[in-house]
Image: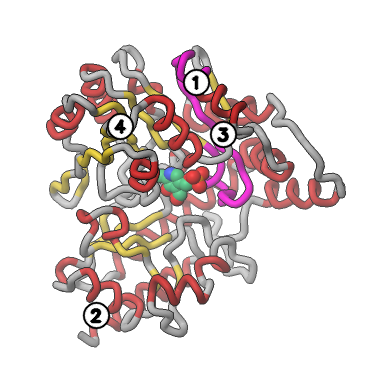
Amino acid sequence: MTVHPPGEHLTGAARAADPAALERFFGAPDGVLPLWIAEPYVPLAPGVVAALQERAATGWYGYEVRPPSAAGAFWDWARRRHGWGPGGLQTTVSPSVGTSIGVLIDRLTDPGDGVILQPPVFTDFKPLVKAAGREVVRNPLVREGGRYRMDLGGLAAAAAGARTRMLILCNPHNPVGRVWSEAELRAAAEVCAEHDVMVLADEVHGDLALPPHRCTPFARAAAGTGARWAAVWGPIKTFGLAGVCDTLLITDDDALTATFREASGRFHLTRTNVFGVAALEAGYRTGGPWLDGLLDLVTANAALLRDGLPDGIGLVEPEGTYLAWLDFRDLGMDVPGLASWLGGAARLALSPGHWFGREGAGFARMTIAAPTDRIEEAVTRLRTAVGAR
Ligand SMILES: Cc1ncc(COP(=O)(O)O)c(C=O)c1O
């Protein structure tokens, strides 16, 4: 197992530890341990770092078009890691997941239409829907025996709404860590096909399934269901490259691709960043062993939480993502009480669960792609704070 050493140059740590952000979100207690932003707090893949350094060393940062090899690098990776190939699919580069979602909401739905979200879920979805003047149609996840599942009956009811046009599905699901099974995804695809609701599958955590779990690309699960779908992939979470890299929009729908490419041309979303081009290919071509080490680290850190959390704090077993969803409800605190207890007594900056929707109240999300000693420290702080109550 590769265990990443604590390093001076922890990606994410700098921004996560930014005093202004800690002040704004956590009341700025001194010495809080920041584990709230979803990116790896470890040295990044050496091949990626080297490619970026080499690119910087050229001293040439003018226009660069995205080479066709970018999509090729992704598909070589997807074949190796997911047994998934590009046959019958179109792949388009997009500057970010948010860009793809924003464009597709804009072009495929009308103001006032409904877009289904399944909270608790990634914080950007709702603002993207609202900013477009569309309505959020809520289909909360259901918790059963400590595990989350999709509410397929609720999904059918939501999809049947006269103005419901789209589902944004998160696979694996940030923040609860579910890696949806092929059967679950297929069932969701069938429901959406029946009601002609398009599925936008955000699979940007798709490389982060924790063995033995495996991510099923929505494309595979939807095959033959008649569902209209697009999926978003990219190296941004996999390799900690959110600050530099492009992402990929994948679909089997020619008209959707044409629509996205028209918007992309019209708004110059085709403009790229020379470093993004270098990092994307280097990640997909050389980053496999580093990612395996990262997944080992996350698995080991999840075990630390499972074994070390004090009574009153539960771990929702992560199947994927490097995010741990912690259940504080037995401690009986309300939303402001939990937030101030985490920042104050426990001296931890975690993402409070209610950021992900009201169903997240009483929970908090901890990034566990971090050196093991940090997670040990977080467990110690939680034990001490619970003990002092
Ligand atoms: C599910 C999910 N989608 C998208 C993003 C962000 O993507 P982007 O920065 O490319 O919009 C994140 C970041 O945490 C995420 O968790």
Q: Residues within 10 Å of mark 1 (few under 14, many from 20)?
A: some
Residue 113 vertical placement versus 262 (above, below) = below
Give the position of the C terminus as an image quadrant. bottom left
The mark tally for this picture is: 4
Q: CA distance from mark 3 to mark 4?
A: 20 Å
Mark 1 or mark 3: whose residue is earlier in sequence? 3
Of tags 4 and 1, the one toward the viewer is 1
Q: Which residue is mark 3?
A: 94
Type of residue at label 3? Answer: Ser
Coordinates of residue 172 in the picture (x, y in percent):
37, 41
Q: CA distance from mark 2 to mark 3?
A: 45 Å
Q: CA distance from mark 4 to mark 2?
A: 39 Å
Of tags 2 and 3, the one toward the viewer is 3
Front in this rendered view, residue 292 or 246: 246
Type of residue at label 4? Answer: Leu
Q: Which residue is mark 4?
A: 167
Q: CA distance from mark 2 to mark 1?
A: 53 Å
Q: Is residue 200 left or right of residue 307?
A: right
Of tags 4 and 2, the one toward the viewer is 4
Q: Residues within 10 Å of mark 2 (few under 14, many from 20)?
A: some
Mark 4 or mark 2: whose residue is earlier in sequence? 4
Q: Which residue is mark 2?
A: 386
Q: CA distance from mark 1 to mark 3?
A: 13 Å
Type of residue at label 2? Answer: Val
Residue 252 vertical placement versus 264 (above, below) = above
Asked where in the image residue 270 lies, by quadrant, the reply is top right
Q: Which residue is mark 1?
A: 259
Q: Main secondary structure of the magenta part?
A: loop
Instruction: Determine the secondary structure under disc 2.
Output: helix
Q: Is residue 36 left or right of residue 319?
A: right
Q: CA distance from mark 4 to mark 1?
A: 18 Å
